Amino acid sequence: MNIPNSVTSILRSLEAAGYEAYIVGGCVRDSLMGHQPHDFDITTSALPEETMSVFSDMQVIPTGLKHGTVTVLADGEPVEITTYRVDGDYADGRHPDEVHFTRSLAEDVARRDFTMNGIAYSPMRGLTDHCGGAEDIRRGIIRCIGEPDKRFGEDALRILRALRFSSVLGFDIEEKTADSIRRNRGLLSQVSGERILVELQKLLCGRNAAMVLLAYPEVFAEVIPELAPCIGYEQNSRYHCLTLYEHLVRAAENTPPDEGLRLAMLLHDIGKPLTRSEDDSGESHYYTHAEKSAELAEQALDRFHCSNALKARVCEIIRYHGIVPEDTDKFIRRRLSKHGAGTFRDIMLAHIADDSAKIASAKERIPVWRAIIRRAEEIAADQPCLSVKELAINGKDLLKLIKPSPLMGEVLDHLLNGVIDGRFNNDHDELMRLAEEYIRSK
Ligand code: ATP
Ligand code: MG
């Protein structure tokens, strides 16, 4: 196992003081899978105050004393050291009402969620695997430690953690654990939106995301009720061959693994059931569904207390996913000006993802969407004038021609549109002349 020296020396210091100490959880799991862990958690028989006195000559932060956690800065890197503990009852399904410290590693491991996360390792003591986690990792299986119903009842977030690990690691969920996840999905209503969103984002970016989304639709409808009407929904459209939910999942799968793009694609058509109409031939249409879907997505993301930046990005992608792009410089420059280079690229990636999840002939448009992305990059690289503040004249210049008034904004917009479309040069004298002309015409 590839353990940083700073972590090994913490383990040695605790052992030298007469305590047991191991790395545990995700870092051992990842190491056994041959992945480099992103952080190392230490578990020890030392009580928090004992740990603090062992490291009295180092920087120690009492980050979660109530739960037995102190953080030691080793080579500038924070390492969490948690005392072996047994969690009390979970009255609210979220936090243990109280925790008891113990000197038994076996008892500490029993409170952890899945067998693969219950393995401890120390260079001095070797591997300790009380729950058969190593074998489950070898077979690629996620299995609750103990009775699944009881474990999900204690902390319903574990339901999403199981699905997230299945997506990210490509593991199967053992049958009893899987049945319990489906049965207990209603408990997710007790989990805070923030915690759900963190898991959902990681899950969506996992390599197995589509399989998990398709295997547990009812669980996802529990955390995003707007998805419920999409499950099994026949689109009755010549462009589609999948039910609405399957289309959402396949579209999400066909974006790069980016949380904003994947969230946007999972939600991009959720407004369809509310905007359906039928023509004389009996085919269905969903004329304002992009706008409706953006509205519903905003509502869902608000429940998750999502950051404003992520929400704005996701909703903008959804709102504009239905506008048919044109492969012309004029169209591309206008859109770059409206959305900015990053979000315009997102919107084009959304078109590719959307068409990848429709009937085969829809895929013929994808090379055009790729060409637009490339052309947009070329145009943006030239740093063209795409906003009022990049114009070669400003409000101060206009004051030489008119008094302050709303007309000033109108003049600047007129000039900007002309520059974006390539009708005007972004040249001070030319723009002053055009401004004068425009004002005279008003
Ligand atoms: P990663 O850090 O890659 O997301 P992880 O398994 O390390 O995965 P953490 O949230 O860092 O996840 O938790 C560290 C360890 O704490 C887990 O491996 C597990 O043993 C335990 N753990 C974390 N969350 C829970 C929980 N909700 N219920 C029970 N045990 C948990
Ligand atoms: Mg971790």
Image (spheres, rainbow, N blue to C red):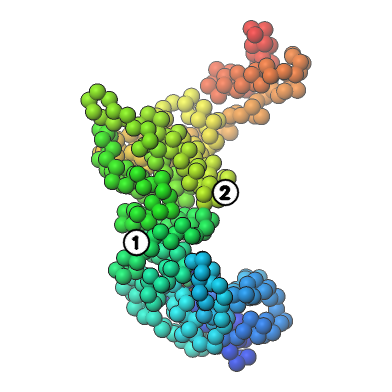
What is the tally of numbered marks visible in this picture?
Answer: 2
At 62% from the left and 84% from the top, the residue drawn is: 47
Residue that carries the numbered disc 2 in the rendered image: 307
Q: Quadrant of residue 243?
A: top left
Horizontal placement of 167 versus 392: left or right? left
Q: Is residue 98 above or below residue 234?
A: below
Q: Quadrant of residue 219?
A: bottom left
Horizontal placement of 67 versus 104: left or right? right
Element class at badge 1: helix
At 45% from the left and 64% from the top, the residue drawn is: 156
Horizontal placement of 343 versus 74: left or right? left
Residue that carries the numbered disc 1 in the rendered image: 182
Closer-to-camera residue (238/364):
238
Q: Amino acid at mark 1?
A: Arg
The circle on residue 36 is none
Closer-to-camera residue (395/182):
182
Give the foreground label among 2 and 1: 1
Element class at badge 2: loop
At 66% from the left and 21% from the top, the residue drawn is: 409
Residue furthest toward the top? 441
Residue furthest toward the front? 91
Which x, y percent locates residue 98?
A: 57, 75
The 10 Å Cα crowd at callout 2, few under 14, some 14 to 19, many 20 or more, is: few
Horizontal placement of 441 versus 346: left or right? right
Q: Is mark 2 within 8 Å of ligand 1?
A: no
Q: Quadrant of residue 75?
A: bottom right
Query: Is tag 2's residue or tag 1's residue first in the polypeptide sequence?
Result: 1
